[in-house]
Structures are given as structure tokens and as C-alpha cells.
Amino acid sequence: MKKIYFIVAVAIFATTSASAQADSQDVIYIKSVKFATPLLEKWIAEYSKVNPEVKIAVADKTVEPESVDIQLLASDGQTANQKAFTIGRYAVLPIASKNSTVLSTLQKKKLNNKRIKELFFEKDILDDDYDEDDAKDKYNATIYSVVNASSVANAFASHFGYEPSKLKGKKISGDEIYLINAVQKDQNGVTFNNLSYVFDINSRTLKNNIALLPLDLKREYSEVIAEANLDKVIALLETKTIDLIPVEGIQFVASHTPDAQTEQFLQWVATEGQAYNHQFGFLNADKKALAQH
Amino acid sequence: MNKKIFLLAIAMSFAVPAIAQTGSIEIAGRVVDDTTQEEIIGANVSVVNDKTGTASDVFGKFTVTAKELPTTLTISYMGYKTLEVDVYEYTEPLTIQLHEERNLLNEVVVVGYGVQKRKELTGSVASVSKVALEQSAISIDGLLGGAISGVNVTQTSGQPGAGSEIRIRGGNSIYASNEPLYVIDGFIYFSEKGATQAGIGGIESSLNPLASINPSDIESIEILKDVSAKAIYGSRGANGVILVTTKKGKKGGNTIHYQYTLGIDKSAKKINLMNAEQWTKINRDEFHNDTWNDSKLQGLITATDWQDAVLRTGSTQTHELSVSGGDDKTRYLLSGNYTDQQGIIINSGFERFSGRINLDKEISSNLSVGITASADRSTQDALTTMSSGDSKGNGTPLAAGITNSMVYALFMPPVLPIHDATGNYNHYNPFELNQNLNYSGRAVNPVSDLKNSIGQTLSTSLLGNFYVKYKIPYIDGLAVKFSAGTNVNFITQNFYAPATSALGFADDIQGRGSIGNRQTVVNQSEYLLTYTKQLSPAHYIDLLGGYTNQTTNTNLILNSADHLEKFEEFDMGEPYPTLRKAKHAILHSLLGRVNYTLLEKYNLTATYRADKSTRFAAGNLWGLFPSVGFSWNVSDEDFAKPLAPTLSSLKFRATYGSAGNQEIEFDEFSIETEFVRYNGVPTIKYTNLGNDNLKWETTTEYNAGIDAGFLSDRLNLVADVYYKKTSDLLVKVFVPFSPTNEKQTFNIGNVTNTGFELALNARLLERRKFTWSASANIAHNVNTITNLGIDGSLTEGDNQEKKYTVGESVGSFYGYVYDGVNLETGNIILRDLNTNTRIDTEGDRTIIGSIQPDFTYGFSSNLTYRRWDVFVSLQGSQGNEVYNKLRRHLSENNKTYNLSTDLLNAWTPGKSSTVPRLDAVITAKELYSRYVEDASFLKIRNITLGYNLPLKIGKTLVQFRAFVSAQNLYTFTHYTGYDPEIAGGIDTGVYPTSRTFLAGAGITF
């Protein structure tokens, strides 16, 4: 019995001292939006291989906010006093479950700008583009979106000229991955999400029981999208600007000038690190943005 | 070694779950309005699976605990769409944006003995807007002017602490009260006639009975206008019902609010009077007044603006402090208020200390109790008056139009100084010929009067109501509620008119004082049974049955004394016999109501109330008041749905029923006597002859209305038409051929009120940083006497200024028709209606105007831009007349008092004018239309500019607000008196209304 106590004591000591050790080292903590975390972890892992002396970690809840060196945010997340480095982009596509009733409705009339607004947003009588007929619910769909402040909902809503609060339907709190779960369960469910969640990044195809809502695009574009191959979609969106598909940047944001080690890491992400963007469902940052680093 | 590693792994695995097994997950967040991003205080946040919840605090923040994730939160707040949020994981505080409910019909409103969805209402129930309730006001009636269609609010006086006359859809009655019934947190609060007076007629303004309610404690005000809504109050409801609900604490933390307001008050207008030079020229040179030869006068001649001498810049300050809060089971609110107003006439003002406790406690899921209690101490310093009901008063000056010292100041010759050479008040006035105001070379000085007279009313009141509510187990929807309350009010009135003052001047008075005490205790108990149930998706019922009783006891003691040098030496004076009165009334009521809704489209309300009042003769004690109402939510019909959202809601309403009025003296059906001496012999005088047949005054009413919402309810319209017939009018008249002027109260005649009301509310702009809303209302009412017994008419006033006659409205002016000035002689021309070539009182007088407006209207608008907000409200009345009696006294052949500057344009030979010759004589004291003025007006009631600043101090979020406000800023009117708002329609020179500029700052945390 005494032996067990001893072992437990040793274990607790070991974990706390390990933690203290980690803290005492010069670790670069990076806080990240959830959907970009896998990509960030990949960057850190690959960077550590070539720079083992530099300790970089994703900041979890246990890390005090003041210890966080930089943040990886969806664009527009920075405040006026912060410096931002765009190192990738994400695209947002509208989706539903494969058996969704909305899909059949939209096969005849694909989603154009007007219909996206009809489907997803509460329209106000004073909105410039208000149309009485549009305001009627033609789709019988339940829209799912997240309530969190930093989310693709911001990107999606602002792309179409709305506040996120104007999104219809049900709200969820947490990672946007749960939007996928929601529409997988709900045949009337409709949502939108970034490519890294819409696609299985291993198989490069759509996740189970998920379908892309048909967009009213030029045939050459719609064929690529309909093929539902992650790499082809990324290739298309990196070369063409498509009005109906919001593409926004992800950025490292720092409230002060990064130190030399952090700067080196950022430079690495902006160059070698870009090679991993596609793998994780992100578009590369455009060259102009990278050139500004 | 392997064993050790295994044990180590087990130990470590203990360490990790130990954290997860803390069991519950705290979820924090903030609830905001999605448009304005302003925090929503008191939103209900519940964890659906765990059946727990909380409410957002003053900063919209909340924290709830969930047993596990995922879980679902429901966030709801009245007026907003309920939001469900599925929480899969919790990483950061949530920001919950609630969307304002566009459909006004889903709003819940307070109705008699309960609440109801507006969608299910059949009656006409109007709510005072929240933004109007947030404005600075000293009493409730200050919030109502122009706010609601069909509610006509007339200030009775500018005297601080004075009340208003409120008429909902015109006046029904001639003699009984026309004031609406107030219900404050369920307690029936009707101010009996003279409730704030203690029998002293020498005090001009009575204290507003509503002054004891602090407006900043009010959460909502609903006005029940039509019979379906108000019939549940039966005998008390005929004049409309104003439901006041005070604020409750809200679940979730504590909120402290403090606000300080400081302002200045100035008379909104001055009467144009002659200055010393003008008056001298007319008085000495035109009127050839011999008084000017008085040798003593020569040393006194000066130039005094007596109006300025009695007016001053007043001030207003208020402190408001409230602490409120609560948890899942308990809600509380404590508030205190201090108000101090220094009036714009010297030595007048109002001071109030008030406090409130509202407490609600849920003892178990079935049992809840609560109490609302308020206490206040108010002091009103008012003018003394000569238009006295006090039979022992010195009423002689009244004949000259001198109703109070302020009016006497207007009359004072501007050549006389306020003070004499020694610095004392000047009491030498050789122009004053009235021996009751000038005797043996010593005259009344109105400034001295105002400084030294006392017209004080002290009110101490307590209003408390306790309830216990129990939901009957096993019968879902069935609940019983008992409540008991009391309203105790002590009034003390102190009156003192020193020997130098107009009221104490007479040789046989030489200083008079009175002390009156009135104690009124109203006890009320209610026993209610309610059953509310959605029987099936198609059928919803809400049943109410109950019994209530209210007893009212008043005791009055009045002591008066003459020959008083000082008020403090009251016991040294020559006393009058003590007047004592004790009265008692009981009202027992049975009430029932059925609300039934079919398919959420068709609503029926049937109410029945039976009242037994001791104010009526045996055999007529019971009054029965039924009503029925129906409404149809047309917009929920399939055929109307394609019209949405252009026509977003539409409801038709129709109601019929009756309500009563018992507001007469407690025992008018019985004989009243008083002991008097007649030629030195003690005898009994009948003051009221009684009436064994006296019964309820009953108002039967039809109402039809439309509620419509357009453009997703951004524009709302409420329109009503109504017809009211009041039968068995209670009228108190002198008994014909009675030698001692006895009066008797009868049920005589009928009055009808027919009208329409229209109210529009528009949310013109709703942007995150910029919102703009506006409301407008207009009402038209035609009041007609349709029957008045055998005689068919009654008159009112010493010179029969008002006449009640069939075919005319209540409050019609009766007099000669003025046909202008004879351009040859400068004389007044009165129309010879019966063409008998002479002007006589019987044949040449007719109806020459009415106090009833053609229509009343109001407008308000609220604009917010970022942290700034602006509120504007206007009130108007069109087509009503006022008899400007003060102007008559200042305009007619008058050699002793000051005159209106209008007389500077008087007719002279060779000069054409609309103003008669200066010495044109009109011997008749009766009214003639020259002084019946159009009193239509449009008032800028309130303009307020506010700035809101949220700050974080330490860990505490603090909301600051600063504002400036102008009240009664300007009145557009042709009326020439101080103010066109004259209760009763005869302007004898009431306390002028003030223009008030306020600045205030508040803090909430």
C-alpha cells in the first residue's frame, strides 16, 4: 500500500515538474482558431525537425493569455494595434446532407447570389435588396451556424453583405466541425463550412453523408466543384476568383514585433510551410500577401 | 519495473479524470441585441436537459452549469425571438445575439387581474412606450400627456406637486368623478374626491394623489380603454383603467442604479400688463382717477413689475437610488427617491421622500409569495386661494376676480412699490377701493401675502400589497391566488393667512389659521382562481373567477381659528367649532372572465362583474356589469398569408358591455344635516336631502377596432371607433323651492360619447449604430347630452357660465355672443338673439363654446446614434375653448387695478379698433364670447438628449448616462393666458406652468 502512495507521489511530482520545466523553457506559444489547428501543428512539427532547438507549442486553455506570443486567426481578427501576417486562405462552401430535400429543390435552380441570401439570411424590410417574394421561405431548410465570435460565419455573412446575427436557423456553440455533425443528422439541415471540414483530408473527398449545394457557376467551374475533389477545388480557387465562394485569409497576429525566433518561424511558414496548406484543406496565401512579410 | 510503470500509468490516469470529474461544466456568455449590440438584462438562460437556468445580469452576462456536453441552451427575453444554442464544446464565453420579435401581437400585456398576449386581446389596451417611461417626470401623469390616443391629460396647475385631469374617451359624468381608475400592482387605487384635502378651502392646489408613486419605479403602464378590457373592474371601470406595474428585481446578480437630476424652472409665459408709464397715462389721463391727488402717493410713485415680483426662477432636483437583483427563487427591488421642487412663484414648492420594496419569492415549484410596498412623505407648499369652498373664508375679493395672491399681484398698480421707504412691505395702496383689501390706510400686499401665508399639505402614505399564489398539484394550469393590501394615507393641511393678507385681512378675521387632518385607510382583499390550459393545439382557455372586497374609511378633523398673530400660536386664537367627519364605504365584488382562443385565430373574452356598493340606497346596492368581446387574427388565415410581410399582422376586434361609476360621496343616498343657528336659534339644516332610489351610473359601450402591422411590423396601426352611452347620470342639484338651499343627488339623464382613435408606431430605421422610431396618435370624441330629465338643462357657476343641455356637450359655455365694437361709439355689441331690441339674460344667451376638444393628438420620436439618444414628444389639442376670466378682469373698465396691454389699442374717436372704448361699460356679469378663447395648442412637451458610456472599472462594468432635457419647451397657441391647459375650462388665473431645463447623470453597475 505504501508503495502505491509512493508511486502516486512520484507521478504527481513528475507531472508537475515536467510542466514547470516546460514553462521555464523559452516556448513560443501560438493560439489558434480551431479549424486551422491541424495545419499549425503540422507546421510546428515540420519546423521542429529542422530547428529542434526552437520550442513552439499550440497554446491550450492552461496557457495564460499573456504567455501567448502570436495567434493564428481568421482574417479581420486583429485589432488596430496588432500586426498581421497572412499565411494561407480558406474557402467556404455551402453544404447539406446527401439526402437533403433542399438539394433536390436546388438542382433545378442552383444557388446564385440572390438565392444564397434567400436561403441563409433573415432579410430586413429596409435592406436595399429586399424583395417581398424573396422573404418567403421557399426551401423549408434549417440553417445551422455557430455563435462564436471568431468563425467562418463572419466570413460567410460579411461576404454576402450581412451581419452573422442575420443568419437564420439554429445556432451551435463550439468548433465548426459540429456543423457537419448537425447536417449529417438533419435531412433539412443546411450549413456552410471551410474546405478542411467539408472534405476528408485523407481521402480528399467529401465527408460521409455530405453534399455540396449546387452553385450557379460557369460550367467549367461547376464541373470542378461537382467533382468534389479537394485538390481540384483548391486548384480552382487559387487561380480563379468566384463570387459565390467566399475565400478569406488566415493570419498570424501579434501585438508586438515578434522576436527573432518567432520571425524565423513565420518566414518558414510563408515559404516552406506553404507546402502543407493544401494537404490540410487550405489555399496558399497569395504572393502579394507573402511578399509583404 | 513493468509493474512500476503500470502503477505509474494508473496513477497518472487518475490525475487526468480527476479534473474531468469535477462533474459540471460552466458555460458563460453575454446576451445582446443583434441590432444595437446593447446588452440585454434579465434574459432567461436555461440548460434544457438539466432544467436549470439563470438570467443575464446588468451587463447581459450569464453563467450556467451543464452536467455534460453537448447540451442545449435556451435564451429567451420578452419581445425577442427565443434562441436555442447547441453547445458541443465550450472554449470561450458565448456571445448570444437575440433578434427582436417583429410581431407586436406576440407581446404580453398586463390586463385586469392577469396578463394576456396582445394577439389574444379582444379589447382596446394601449401601452405607454418604454422610451416614454424612461423620461424624467415627477409623477405618472407627466408621462401620459400625448402618449396614448384618446387619453386627454390636462395639467390642473403649474403648482409643483399638483395633479392632472385625465379623461379617457371623453367625460361620461356630470357630477360623479370622470377620473380613471388606477390599479397599482393589483391594488385598486382610486383617489376619492378631495382625498388629499382635509377640508381647508383656502389652499389653492390639491396634492396630486399620484405624487406618491415614483415614476422611475414604473415598469409598464397599460390603459384599458374599451369595455371588454375594463369591465372586469365593473363599477370602477367606466372612466377607463390605468394599470401601473412597478419594477421587479431580475434574476442574476445585483444591480445598483443611481441618478441625480438638477434643473431650473421658469414661467413659460408672462401676461402682457401695462408698465407704470402706460398705466399712469391711462389711469390718470384717460380715466381721470382722483386717487392721484393723494398726497401720500406722491412719495411712493415708482415703477414695479408685480408679476416679476411674485415669479422667480424655480429649481428641481431629484436623487434616485435603486438596488435590485435576485436568483432562481428570489427577486427583489429596493428603491428610494428624493424630489425637491422650488416653484416659480415665491414660497411654493414640493418635496417628496419615497421608498419602495418589491419582493417575490418562489418557495416551491407550486408556491410563490410576494409583496410590493411603497411609502412616501410629500410636502406641498401651495398658494392660498380666495376661490374658496371654505364657507368661513373671506370671499369678497373673489368678486373682483382675485382668486389668489399671484392674481392680485397682476392686478397691482405698477406705480406702487413692493417695499416702503423703511424696507418693510408697502401696505399703502390708495387705488384699492375694496374694504376687504384696504382698510384704514392699510392695504394688502400680494408679495407679502405669498411670503407670509401658509398653504401647506403634508401627506404620509403607505401602499402595500401581499400575495400568495399556489399552483394546484395534479391539475395542470389551475392556480389560486390570494392577495391583501392596504393603503393608508395621512393628510395634514396647514393654512395660515396673516392679518396683513387678503384672506386674513377682514376686520372680523385679523389672521386666520386652520389645521386639517384626514386619515384614509383602504383595505383590499382578493381571492382569485385561475385555470389556464392549452387543451389541444386548437383550443386554449384562460379562466378567472374571484371575489374581492375593498373597504374605505376616512376620518377628518378640521380646526380653525381667527385673530391669529402667528400660526405657531394657533391655540391662542379664537377657535371655530371643530369639524369632524367619519365615513365608511364597502365594495364587495364577484368577478369572472373566460378567454378562449380557437386555432390561435379566433379569440373570445366574456367578463362578468357584480358589485355591491354601500354608496347606494338599499335595493340598488348591486350593479351588474357584463361584457363580451371577439377578435379575429385575420393575418393567420391562409388567404392572408401571401400578403405578408407587407401586411404582417391584422386583427379585427369588436366588444360590447357595460361598466359603472360609483364615485360620489359615501352617503349621498342618505339625509345629511348640520347644526346651525338661524336668527340665533339652534336648528338643524339639511345639507343633503338623500335619495332612496339612488343607483349606479352605468356606461354601455360598443367598440370596434383594427390592429394592423405592415412591412414586418415596422409600421403598426391601431384604430378604434366607439360609442358610449352613460345612463342614470348622477347629478347633484339644488332642490327647487327649498328655503335653505338643500341639495339632492338624483339619477337623471344620459350622455353619449362617440369617437375614433388612431395610433401609429413606426420603427423607421434599425441599424446597429443608428435607430429611429416614431409614434403618433390622434383621437376625436363627440360628447353629447341626450337626456337631462324634465328640465332638459342645468347650469353651473355663479353667473351660469356653463350649461348642461340636451344636444350640447358637457362643459359648454353659456353666454352672450360678442359682435365686436361699435365703430361709432366704441361700445361693446352683444347680439340680440331674440330680437326684442334689448339684451336680456333669458333670451339672448346661448352656447358659445365648449371645453371639449374636436381632437387631441400626440407625437413622439426616439433616435439613437452610437452612444447618443434623442427623445422628442409633442402633445396637442384642437378645437377646445377656455373662458379667460382673468383677461376679462384685466381688460374691463377698471380704475383700481393694472390692465392688459391690449387696452393700449382701445377704440378712441376716429380710431378703429377691435378693443372697445376704455370706459365702455358692460354691466352684465354673465359670460360673453369675447373672452371665450380658442385654446387649441401644440406643446413641445419634452426634448431629451442623452449620452451613454459603458466603462470597465477593474473587473466591474459600469454604465454611465448623462442627459439634458427641456420640458414644456414651447406652446404653439392663440390662447392669451398663461397656458391653454385649463382643467374645467375657466381660467381665473391658476399657477402658471413652467418651462423646465434639466441635466442629469446616472450610473448603473
Image (tube, coloured by chain):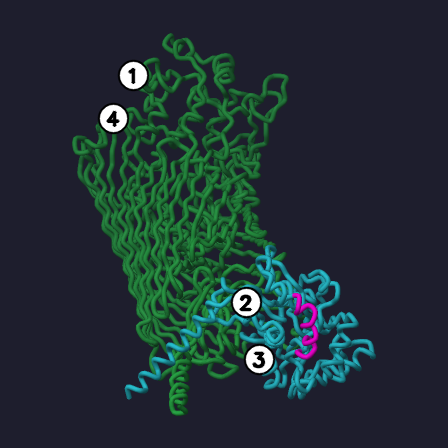
Chain colours: A cyan, B green
Q: Chain of mark 2?
A: A
Q: Residues within 10 Å of mark 3 (few under 14, many from 20)?
A: many
Residues in magenta?
Answer: A267-280
Q: Is residue A268 magenta?
A: yes
Q: Chain of mark 4?
A: B
> Residue B645: horizontal and vertical position, in percent?
65, 68
| Label drawn at residue B440 | 1
Q: Nearer the viewer, mark 2 or mark 1?
A: 2
**Rendered position, B640 above or below B816:** below
Residue displayed at 63% across by 71% down = A152
Label 4 sits on what residue type? Answer: Gln
Label 1 sits on what residue type? Answer: Ser
Give the distance between the C-alpha atoms of the residues marked 2 and 4, in whole angstroms.
96 Å
Label 3 sits on what residue type? Answer: Tyr
Tell me if residue B178 can be seen: no
Q: Nearer the viewer, mark 3 or mark 1?
A: 3
Marks 2/1 same chain: no
Looking at the rendering, which quadrant does residue B188 occupy? bottom left
